[in-house]
Amino acid sequence: MKTVSFLALAVLAVTSLTTLVEIPLLPSASHASGQPLLIRQGPLGVSGAGPGGTFWFQQGAQGDSTTNYSVGASVDIRTVYDKVNNDAHSYWVGSILANGAFVQVGYLNGLTTTNQYYCCAWFYEFFPPQGQPGATTSPPIIGPAGSAGPIGSWHTYSMNYNISAGVGVWSFYMDGRYLGSSPTSGQQYYLGSGATDTGIHTVAALSEVAQTINTDDIIGPAEFRNFLYEKSLNSFAPVPTGLVHIALGVGSDFAQNPYGVAEIIGTQRDFLAGSYIPNTCGQSNPCGPDECGNSNTVLWSATLDLSCTGSGFSFSFVDMDGNSVTPTWISLNDSSGREIFYTGYASQTLPSPNPSLSGQWIMSHVSWHSVNVAMGETVNTSGSQVFLTNVFSITLGVVGYIYSLPVKGATVILYLPDSTNQTLQTNDNGKGVFTQLPRYSYSIHISVPYGIRSNQVQDITGPGSMVAKVFSLPELITIIVPPILIAVLVSVAVARKEHQRQAMIQAQMQTQPIMSSGYCKRCGQPLPPTANFCTSCGTPARMMIQ
């Protein structure tokens, strides 16, 4: 009975421990821990550390001379998720100031002190004029992880000269909420009394790969819109002319910036900046061609709308199950090499293709959770069209490693490539369905009732089913209980043998004759226990048993 009780307690102990122990089978995405690395974002015209050192990529739009002597700037930015390496990605509005200082505000993706992703936080930064203390060491001020999310949301970032806070002090905002200000006179990193406006410098709205060592990063592309400036406080006006800004830190081993900038069709002051956008710009060459086939550094202007005359058109997209999807942005190519970009698909204008060539537009990029899911379909230029995308559903089965029994009630988190996730709970058959997935290598986290949590990586390339194996309760009983049972049986056998040995010793002690002192039967003389005869009368002595 004691043996059975002991086994029952052992099983209960193992079951309770499995809710506390995690065995990472494969690496997986996880929430950010640690503090964000304070990687310096570059001001306009930033230079690198020399050949072979770290460098900066910047791409976006600057205002023209109309925005000189501004006391503030603002832009809306849609958050994205990036492939960050050992650097940081930022999306900001900023300007060089009259005295050479620099200010910027926006959002940032980077790494933490524990080398994890730090996603989508607001940040602002300021640099005193070159030659002054702190001009190259002033660190960014970064908000909590997720403070500029959720992914894909719009936020307005703005800054202005704040005389009420002190001479030479600039303040920074997200969605009108005050984030902080640059230091006042006498404090470290003070911008100086001449930092009252932008002077002869223009305002800019850029995306940036900061302090990187290679060109492997995927940045955005982020969407910028409503680019504004102000000459007097609380009087924002649209930036009248947007000029392409493509920059690369001086001293790099690379000849040009691999990232690009493109206007959104039909909307002024609305553009993409970052990856997946062709960039034919050298360091001093104009960008092109634009959506009209022209080489030009102008994204938009007050007098020139680069949306070419064409036919009215609307786009819609479906997954392989026939359900609607809404990509974050799309691009079309025609046979002459032009590429045009949209972020809205209802009643858009489709520029006329080059009539001297094939006269066709091809759906070349459909961005869904930061993955291109385009099927390369030809666009019908007369009316509306529904495009099929490489987006599909997957049935996931969670089973035990040994017996392949379905695991009911397991919670599964699938991390998508743009850092969002889908979560499901398995049914009675141990299955659940993830919908509208692009092709990707996914990190999967599985929490198992009375089992061991598992982190796995699965390459999902198309619709169908997949299986994830975990250690559930039957596996734990199989693996852990038999060794415990064997140990208990061995202990019981040893105890029994010891009990038998002790019993035998007791029996021997009870039957063994005991030598004792006595008296001579003839004369009554006392006899010692070892005496063979009586020393008085010589009568032989005999053994006495007591």
Image: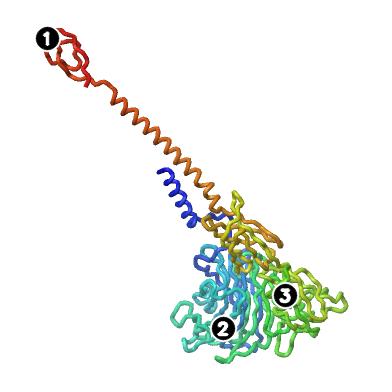
Which of disc 1 and disc 3 is earlier in sequence? 3
- Up-down: is 26 above or below 273? above
Q: Which of the 4 image quadrants contains residue 82?
A: bottom right
Q: What amino acid is found at the position of numbered circle 2 in the picture? A: Ser
Which residue reaches farthest right? 356
Does the residue at mark 3 contact the one at mark 2 (Cβ under 8 Å)? no
Q: Which of the 4 image quadrants contains residue 78?
A: bottom right
Q: What amino acid is found at the position of numbered circle 3 in the picture? A: Ile
Q: Read off the residue under disc 1.
A: 536
Give left or right: position of 194 versus 226. left
The N terminus lies in which quarter of the figure? top left
Q: Say which of 21 and 402 sits in front.
A: 402
Q: What amino acid is found at the position of numbered circle 1 in the picture? A: Ser
Q: Read off the residue under disc 2.
A: 158
Q: Residue at x 12, y 8 (%)?
A: 537
**Whole-percent x and y of residue 212?**
61, 67
